[in-house]
């Protein structure tokens, strides 16, 4: 996630993500990646990581997470389910979360 200007919608996404398992790891994109994906963030990566870490539903944050998830990343972090908000088309999900989609791990 980008997590810029953390708000109630982010909290709801993380609350819902937590229902898919008992440990929630959140990847926070770098400033550069976020700028290419959406827009340049207002908050720095460190600030965005700090607010995501402070959310009670989050157990771990990966700063500068990759934009495209591969099998090695899923295995390295023992990720069994990948959750994304509803702002991604099926084609976008395949492009970004291809390994998770192929493994049936995208919720």
Image (cartoon, helix red, strand yellow):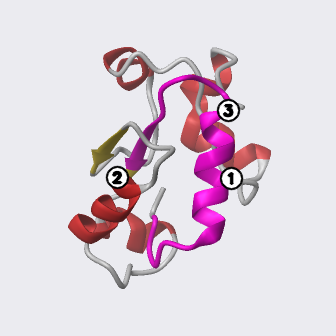
Q: Is residue 92 magenta?
A: no
Q: Eyeballing the image, is 82 above or below 33?
A: above
Q: Nearer the viewer, residue 19 or 62?
A: 19
Which dot, 1 or 3, sits closer to the camera?
3
Q: Work out which residue is located at the far left of the displayed protein and give it.
A: 46
Where does residue 87 sit, x and y in percent of width and height? 72, 60
- The alpha-carbon separation of the residues under discs 1 and 2 comes to 18 Å
> Pointer 3: residues within 10 angstroms few (<14), some, or many (20+)?
few
Which dot, 1 or 2, sits closer to the camera?
2
- The tag on residue 56 is none
Q: Which residue is mark 1?
A: 85
- The tag on residue 53 is 2
Where does residue 12 sit, x and y in percent of width and height? 67, 57
Q: Point out the tag, 1 or 3, that comes first from the N-terminus.
A: 3
Q: Nearer the viewer, residue 86 or 19?
A: 19
Q: Secondary structure at mark 2?
A: helix
Q: Residue at x 36, y 64 (%)?
A: 51
In this rendering, position of residue 46 left or right of residue 23 = left
Q: Secondary structure at mark 3?
A: loop
Q: Residue at x 34, y 52 (%)?
A: 53
Q: Point out the tag, 1 or 2, that comes first from the N-terminus.
A: 2
In this rendering, position of residue 40 left or right of residue 99 = left
Where does residue 19 sit, x and y in percent of width and height? 67, 32
Q: Which residues are magenta?
A: 3-27
Q: Which residue is mark 3?
A: 19
Q: Is residue 15 magenta?
A: yes
- The alpha-carbon separation of the residues under discs 1 and 3 comes to 14 Å
Q: Secondary structure at mark 1?
A: loop
- The alpha-carbon separation of the residues under discs 3 and 2 comes to 17 Å
């Amino acid at each position: 996630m980008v997590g810029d200007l953390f708000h109630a919608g982010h909290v709801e996404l993380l609350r819902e993500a937590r229902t898919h398992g008992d440990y929630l790891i959140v990847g926070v994109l770098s400033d550069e990646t976020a700028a290419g994906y959406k827009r340049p963030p207002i908050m720095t990566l460190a600030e965005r990581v700090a607010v995501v870490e402070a959310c009670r539903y989050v157990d771990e944050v990966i700063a500068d997470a990759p934009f495209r998830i591969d099998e090695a990343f899923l295995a390295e972090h023992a990720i069994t389910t990948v959750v994304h908000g509803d702002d991604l088309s099926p084609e976008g999900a395949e492009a970004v979360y291809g390994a998770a989609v192929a493994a049936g791990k995208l919720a």
